[in-house]
Image (spheres, rainbow, N blue to C red):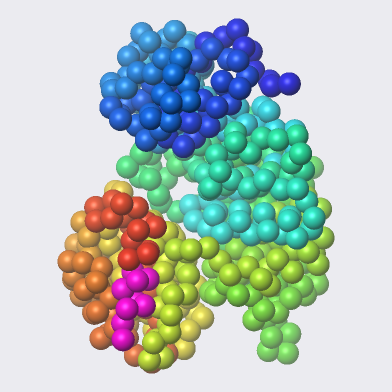
Amino acid sequence: MSLIASDHFRIVVGLGKSGMSLVRFLANRGVSFAVADTRENPPELATLRRDYPQVDVRCGELDVEFLCRADELYVSPGLALATPALQAAAARGVKLSGDIELFARNAKAPIIAISGSNAKSTVTTLVGEMAAAAGKRVAVGGNLGTPALDLLSDDVELYVMELSSFQLETTDHLGAEVATVLNISEDHMDRYSGLPAYHLAKHRIFRGARQVVFNRQDALTRPLLGEGMPCWSFGLGVPDFKGFGLREENGEKYLAFEFQNLMPVRELKIRGAHNQANALAALALGHAVGLPFDAMLAALRTFAGLEHRCQWVRDLDGVAWYNDSKATNVGAALAAIEGLGADIEGKLVLIAGGDGKGADFKDLRDPVAANCRAVVLMGRDRELIAEALGDAVPLVRVSSLDEAVQQCRALAHPGDAVLLSPACASFDMFKNYEERGQLFARAAEDLA
């Protein structure tokens, strides 16, 4: 039985992927609702008109009077809650909510909830594979892949959810079995007033959580905890009680839990220190919900990583090429630069640039100086990155991705790695980060 009052009127605001999942969910439960979208031709409009021709849909500028007819607005993560029409409706007593809040009210199985500025897709996918290896009927999605409401099923034993700060803004009480914020660095500063506001949005994930996982190397990931809250940690240092980390024995580095070595780091298919941290975070989350270590380690040994996330493309003349197009913010690029930089014999030749989303690039300077041979810059905000890097390493400016790949080939020495990790969104030059990554991989593979 759905936990939603069917005699109330709802409006779905935003008709993208999550908006369409809301439409299906509400229609299946006989709830009275309408749809609004700020765009004249939203992505799912044709689907809505075909499958639900009876639903009232309003496109274009939001009408406050129309919104105020609803008891509750389910707002798309893509639309800022600061939008004046939404604020006006809220001021008149209309509740602003979202698909994750509705999912949480209706999910019958435990939820593993994962957020963070970076690596959440990798960790979410990995925990899902660990649960499947343990024989669990697991559903994986949220901000990644399948929208949350489409996952709801009485057959599911465990939900593994990637959640963005935008989704969490409209989530009042998630009630996860275990929740984590993997890391926090500046992102979406074009939407938030600053890091504190972004941090607050992320930490909504801990509301109602029964257990917590935090990153020992990032104080901003640790929530204010009530007494007696079960708490696990991960980090690249030596672990202590209730901690996952790295231990060294006879020159061999191991993933470890408390005082027990679990498996040699060299058995991981995913490369770099940042991916070792991802593996440890996944182990902590899985352990919190009772997944056995043998199943989790078996999944780790076969997990090759996700496309566009520090993904190996090819080796050519002693140089490895990596596609990290998903690094759409500074923190993600830093994780790849430092993680991969520590894992190779030579230096990195980095491709960076694009739409910086209002970010400050100054934190790139020292890691670039320590790990890079050169940086090839492209895109709208390349001069902002150039200014932040100063004279740390040689800088080469290009006007296309193909030109960037050619320059990297000329700059790289045997033992080096070429890394596309832009620290920027892709929309100034590409349809999305996937297209950027695919074109990079193709250009690299076409090198003779």
Residue 70's x, y, as percent?
48, 11
Q: Is residue 427 visible?
A: yes
**337 sits left or right of 149 in the view:** left
Q: Is residue 23 magenta?
A: no
Q: Which residue shows up at 53% across the image and 58% down it?
A: 119
32 or 65, which is in the foreground? 32
**Magenta stretch in the rendered image:** 440-448
**241 sits left or right of 367 in the view:** right
Q: Is residue 224 above or below residue 252?
A: above
Q: Is residue 254 above or below residue 285?
A: below
Q: Which residue shows up at 47% across the image and 30% down it?
A: 19
Residue 54's x, y, as percent?
46, 14
Residue 12's x, y, as percent?
46, 22
Q: Is residue 253 above or below residue 423?
A: below
What predominant SS class does the magenta segment belong to? helix
Q: Which residue shows up at 51% across the image and 25% down it?
A: 23
